[in-house]
Image (cartoon, rainbow, N blue to C red):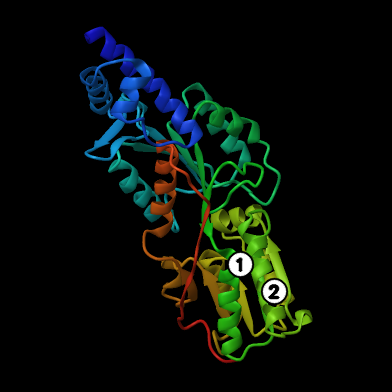
Amino acid sequence: MAVKYKWLAGRLETLIRKNIREGINKLPTEQELCEKYGLSRQTVRMALKTLEEKGLIDKKRGSGSYITGRSPKSRENEVGILIFNDQDYLYPAVIQDIRDTLTKNGFFITIFPTHNQVCQEREILQKLQEKPPRGLIVEGCKSALPNPNLDLYHALIKNGCPVVFLYNYYPELPQCPYVKDDNFSGSSLLVRHLAEQGHTRIGGIFKADDMQGPERYQGFLETMRDLGLPLSNAPACWYDSRDLARLDAIDDGSFLNEMIRDLSSCTAIVCYNDFLAYHLANVLLQSGFQIPDDISLAAFDNTYLSNSDILSITTLSHQPHEMGVRAADTLLKKLKGLPVHSQEARWNLNQKESTGAP
């Protein structure tokens, strides 16, 4: 019997890997295993106990044996997190939520900052080919542009490493679910808020090389149209990661002065995020503008920058812990062979002092 139950445990480990690939998160019942392999109930139970001790399954009394998605070797239960930044803005809190959720389920995380650079992303993915983690949570780099690293993602997925995207995803990888902001409805919420304040000349500033930018612009544009506001009075300005890097590294915000000139006819501006709104507010105040008397600002993300000492900025937020927990839960389901679907998180408006009547 000793040889038989070990043999069966090995066969079931192979079945577990197959089930995960096929989206099946449960093993056959004890009776089904007895009939399929011609073994006694005691032998089957010993094989299942071996798998349970290895952490490969959870046995639920009266329900069955469910796949955990973990490896029998704890050092192999690594989840890689490819994310723009692990030190600032909203990222530390999101990473902590991912870590807490995965740790409770027997996994540990390794963080790989990409700084939104596809060359850095490629270096990381090449190293991961040597020893793929159990799974990846990825914030796509410059996701509005064609990505040169899809071959490496395909190789990891083929080797059994599922990928879940967070915030920015690659449409060329439709088999990978995403958890992202509902960018369209977010812009719509901000435009409607400004319109309710009495603004009709509303402009926007969006990021060109991340998918969030075009999506937020689309919501902005269509809501202006739905409200009957003249689109000729809805100018939009665009910036990219290079502008952002110069602003962050050497405080070069010259592109913001150009945008202020381009948006001079507007009484309100929808900003791509709090970071952009904070720096724009600085330039406006230094130029003699009064906020919101001369111009109103509204943004996304509800970070600490929306509550700075210079100005509190009207901004959008999610429920606490929502994005990180959703991304981790989606990956856990993938690892267990459960069906998953992409998700978009709705926004909540936080009105502060940066918006008012024109």
Quadrant of the rendered image containing residue 122? top right
Q: Spatial distance from mark 2 to mark 1, Cα to Cα?
A: 9 Å
How many labels were placed on the picture? 2
Contact flag, marks 2 and 1 (Cβ < 8 Å) = yes
Residue 271 point in image, percent of width and height: 59, 70
Q: Quadrant of residue 291?
A: bottom right
Q: Residue at x 53, y 52 (%)?
A: 342
Q: Which residue is mark 2?
A: 222
Give the numbered dot on residue 184.
Answer: 1
Q: Amino acid at mark 2?
A: Glu
* Above or below 293: residue 204: above
- Answer with left or right where residue 162 lies relative to residue 118: left
Of residue 15 and residue 101, the one placed in the foreground of this image is: 15
Q: Of the residues shown, which amino acid type is indicated by label 1?
A: Phe
Q: Residue furthest top?
A: 3
Q: Is residue 56 left or right of residue 273?
A: left
Q: Residue furthest right?
A: 232
Percent of width and height locating residue 43: 24, 17
Q: Residues within 10 Å of mark 2 (few under 14, many from 20)?
A: some
* Quadrant position of residue 286: bottom right
Where, quadrant-wise, is the N terminus in this rendering?
A: top left
Looking at the rendered structure, which numbered label has been put on residue 6?
Answer: none
Dot 1: few (<14), some (14–19), or many (≥20) neighbours within 10 Å? many
In the rendered image, the vertical position of residue 311 relative to residue 167, given as above or below: below
- Viewer-proximal residue, 36 or 48? 36
Identify the residue at horizontal 37%, vertical 38% (top origin).
109
Check the picture and name the quadrant holding the C terminus. bottom right
Q: Position of residue 170 (x, y in %)?
A: 62, 46
- Residue at the image point whose x is 49% and y is 71% from the top: 316
Residue 49 visible to an observer of this rendering: yes
- At x 65%, y 85%, the residue is 267
